[in-house]
Image (spheres, rainbow, N blue to C red):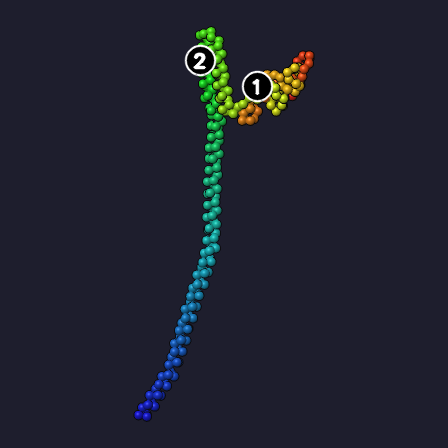
């Protein structure tokens, strides 16, 4: 019994001694294998990186060429679109100018109709009062049309002379109006939307006196 027990112990010792060595060898082999795989992977990645870098340089050139081509194409399209826009706008502007008077011309045609009827009636009859009344109605119709379009008369008689509104044609003596006040309207002036489109031609009072009417020096009149 004692010998068998000793032999068993020896075997266990031998196994225990040999086992760490095997493990160590296996670990070393595994480590070496991992290092080889890592080196191979690093080499492949390095080769791939070099290949990518080389392609990137060529690709950059191609990308810039493509961008330049796209910009040129876009520029040509914008030039063509802008040219078409200018032509279209010019045509529209010409149409506006050509037909700008339509808005006021159409109502004036009705005035012409009234004048024609009044003239036909006057040639067939002798009723002056009816003719006068028809003329007044037609005159009022014209004023209404002008008012709708923003046209308004400029006040003159009894107003102080204003070179921004009035054009002095004469200077007259007047007991009714003091000097510098408009005594007579020769031709009525008009504004369009607040802007003077025709000055009032007027005679300005020189105050009371016995002198004959005399023309006033005025740059506009000259």
Question: Alpha carbon of mark 1 to alpha carbon of mark 2: how far?
Answer: 27 Å
Q: Indicate whether 177 appears above or below 95.
A: above
Which residue corresponds to mark 1?
188
Mark 1 neighbour class, 10 Å CA radius: few under 14, some 14 to 19, many 20 or more:
some
Q: Is residue 187 left or right of residue 32?
A: right
Q: Identify the residue at horizontal 58%, vertical 21% (top origin).
A: 155
Q: Indicate whether 52 appears above or below 76.
A: below
- 100 or 125: which is nearer to us? 125
Q: Is residue 60 left or right of residue 203?
A: left
Measured as percent of width and height from the top left, residue 28 is found at 41, 76
Measured as percent of width and height from the top left, residue 182 is found at 62, 19
Can the viewer see residue 75?
yes
Measured as percent of width and height from the top left, residue 76 is found at 47, 40
Q: Identify the residue at horizontal 67%, vertical 17% (top origin).
A: 207
Mark 2 neighbour class, 10 Å CA radius: few under 14, some 14 to 19, many 20 or more:
few
Q: Identify the residue at horizontal 46%, vertical 53% (top origin).
A: 59
């Amino acid at each position: 019994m004692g010998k068998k027990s000793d032999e068993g112990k020896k075997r266990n010792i031998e196994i225990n001694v040999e086992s760490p060595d095997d493990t160590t060898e296996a670990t070393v082999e595994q480590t070496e294998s991992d290092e080889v795989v890592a080196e191979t992977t690093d080499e492949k990645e390095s080769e791939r990186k070099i290949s990518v870098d080389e392609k990137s340089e060529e690709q950059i050139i191609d990308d810039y060429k493509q961008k330049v081509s796209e910009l040129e194409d876009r520029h040509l399209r914008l030039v063509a679109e802008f040219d078409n826009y200018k032509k279209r706008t010019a045509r529209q502007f010409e149409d506006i100018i050509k037909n700008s008077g339509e808005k006021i011309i159409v109502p004036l045609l009705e005035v012409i109709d009234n004048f024609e009827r009044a003239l036909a009636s006057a040639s067939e009859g002798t009723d002056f009062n009816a003719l006068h009344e028809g003329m007044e109605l037609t005159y009022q119709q014209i004023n209404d049309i002008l008012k709708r379009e923003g046209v308004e008369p400029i006040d003159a008689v009894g107003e102080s002379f204003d070179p921004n509104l009035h054009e002095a044609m004469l200077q007259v003596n007047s007991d009714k109006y003091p000097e510098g006040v408009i005594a007579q309207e020769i031709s009525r002036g008009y504004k369009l939307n607040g802007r003077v489109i025709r000055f009032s031609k007027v005679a300005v009072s020189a105050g009371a006196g016995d002198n004959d009417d005399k023309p006033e020096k005025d740059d506009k009149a000259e």
